[in-house]
Image (tube, helix red, strand yellow):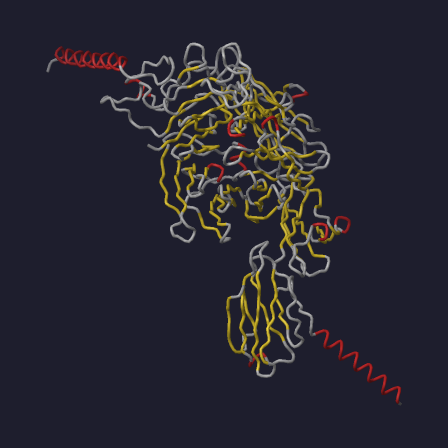
Amino acid sequence: MNKKRFIIIIVVILLLALGFFIAAYLISGKSGGTGGNGGEDKGGLFDNFYPFGRPADSPDGSKGGEDGKTGTIPGTGPGTGGDQNILGEAPFNPLVQLSTVPTSGAFIFERSGKTYVQYAERATGHVYEVSLDNFGQQRLSKTTVPGIHEALWTNAGKTILYRYLRDDQETIATFAMVAPSASTGTSTFPAPAEGEDGSAELMGVFLEDDILDVVISHDSKSAFYTKKERTTDKLFGYAGTLANGAAKKVFEHSFTEWLPVAFDGTRAWLQSKASQGVPGYLYVLNISSGAFTKVLGGVNGLTALPSPDGKKILYSESTRGALKTFLYNTDKKESKEFPVATLPEKCAWGKKSDVLYCAAPATILTATYPDHWYMGITLFTDNIWEIAVKDFAEDPLVSINMTGLGKNTDIVRPMLSADELRMIFINKKDSTLWLYRQR
Amino acid sequence: MKSLRLFFFVLGGILAFQFAFAQLSLPGTPTGSAGTGNTNWNIALEPRAPGPGEDVTAKAVSYVINLNTADITWYVNGQSKLRGKGATAFSFKTPGSGQSMTLRVVIDSAEFGVLEDTIEISPADVDMLWVARTYTPPFYRGKALPSSESIVTVTAIPHIFDSAGKAVSVGNTMFTWKKAYRTIPSASGAGKDSFSYEAHFTHNEDAISVAVSSRDGSSSRETTVQNRVVEPSIVFYENRALEGVRYEQAVGNEYRITGNEVRLSAEPYFFSFDGKNVNPGKYEWWLDGKLINVSAARKSEATFGKPEGGSGRAKVELSVSNPATFIQQSKKSVLISF
């Protein structure tokens, strides 16, 4: 073949390829929705190049849509007009990014038979609500409160605790605010004042400064928190819904490093703060009687996550750079090694205490656990495990199912939906909010 | 002579009475019921005051009954565990902390017939938890570790029971504290459940012991913790204008500025500081070997801006020392590229 013919063939191939892409672009632009309220995403074939969604449209994290109040994060969720393959089918992706900006916390709940997620943006404190049906987003609050380190939903979702550092960068402030409601036309709680654009202004009360740690009950109806009194050098524990800051002092102890790790409304589980090689202890406090009973003790580097019924404790032990995880049965008083090594706080129990969804590192490098993970010196790359816990006498103890995330994710604050088919979590590496779902 | 005979008669009676009384005691009973009060034999435990989950040997002891020819049966919580002729010793493991078990032994001897006794065993235990008064950042979920010369407070949580099997309150518990195995009388006494001390020098261990016992001495336990002293350390975090300090991910040995500047927040882990800015610590920030000034009110923070045009790298170092101690000091550096 001579040179001239060769060039002609190459040009024809290039023209054909260009024609194909133009046709695909035009065709996909006519079909599929955006999945939201006025998103700008044209969707189509190109969105398959962004399987986890495009970055937010603006650097400050404002959402798609003209006023930043409503819209869909472009490219997120199924059926957003971008996930269809060349045959017009929407490939199922178990992992969906719900926020592209750092978040302080989130809450998954049901309303009128549908599942929603509310989350707070870390930089602004704005509260957003996402429908898990169509992944449409709605901003619920306008008042800006920057630097929210932690947002927790209590009082069945009607109260949000905002925890942040005051100007001295050392004092922890905790604000219990009325959760802004979505524009559904109904409200079961006194509606907060409305801002200029119709979104709600924040209303609430400040709790005392320097609340150390807070844990929300399994049913999200109440909370337990600890506070150290400087004058007496003692640790106090408080429990309540925290609606309007309501809480009652229920605990007092001379050891000041108790960390609340679980609460069921009547019992709070307190674990001594952990460090590798240091014997740790887990006690349970009965709120009514004041009885403070030992559950586990003398476990090096102990971190623990009790089940909702309190009969099983998932706990980890760390010595000499290694991490091991166990399941403890409080009736039989025996432990069995768990098939997955992880830190229990990366797991979420099902409400019947018979299933665990755990994020577990694909590889656990030698490090000082959990210290270096808490300090942010060591981060993990997780897979998600669904672990059904059988009767303790059975062997194997559990049946397991693992999903690789294919993404650099270190999961924190997992929370299951009511049907336990979905789980939301925050990626520790960038604080973005994600949804993991089963088909 | 008559009075001498009377004297010896009374003396003999007294001695016989004391001998008989001595046979009623049950040495080695840590707690619970004292049995049926038989005088011919008793149950002895080794160790005398076992802890939870501990291996114990119970022995039937008698100077009157020939136990080697007797049929002996041992029961734990009503279940027969060992039976045999001359089975005078029985080994078992005590239950966990806060739990109790019933140990019953039945002796069928030719001379004395069937004899039995029961004791309740509630193992004594004591948990030792300690807190170092050293700095950790707000929201930190891990433990504050002791550095050299820091103050550490140890709290003992006893789990001991009186002879009736009832839990003894902290106020009625005797605490004896020891540091490096030497008793500290000033810290010891009834209800004194905590003890504070100054930590040793770095990379050493402090051995802190506590012995707890009920007032009647029926239950006691001693335990020791070895607290390792660590070096304080500095960890850098990015402090973003709107998000605040990103404690989730520490700045490593290298950092690339993505915007126009970076503000670093230095957290002085495990220094004897109440706060990171308001403290007696001496902070020295260096940029490429030159000492730089930072705000005295915010000495734990420094902001570094990207120079206009060009690219390059600069080394940032921070040295922190605590003049209130001899050797609490640390250094940290990061290579910033732009």
Is residue A115 among what the camera can see? yes
Total residue callouts: 0
Q: Classify residue B287 by image quadrant.
A: top right
Q: Residue at x 39, y 31 (%)?
A: A436
Q: With respect to residue B143, does B291 lie above or below? A: above
Viewer-closest of B43 and B306: B43
Which quadrant of the rendered structure holds the N terminus of chain B? Answer: bottom right
Viewer-closest of A240 and B211: A240
On the image, the x and y values in percent for residue B20 come to: 72, 77
Q: Is residue A400 left or right of residue B105?
A: left
Q: Residue at x 45, y 30 (%)?
A: A425
What residue occupies the far bottom of the structure in this picture?
B1
On the image, the x and y values in percent for residue B169 come to: 69, 51
What residue occupies the far left of the structure in this picture?
A1
Q: Classify residue B168 by image quadrant.
A: bottom right
On the image, the x and y values in percent for residue A428 come to: 48, 29
Q: Classify residue A286 by image quadrant.
A: top right
Q: Residue at x 63, y 77 (%)?
A: B62
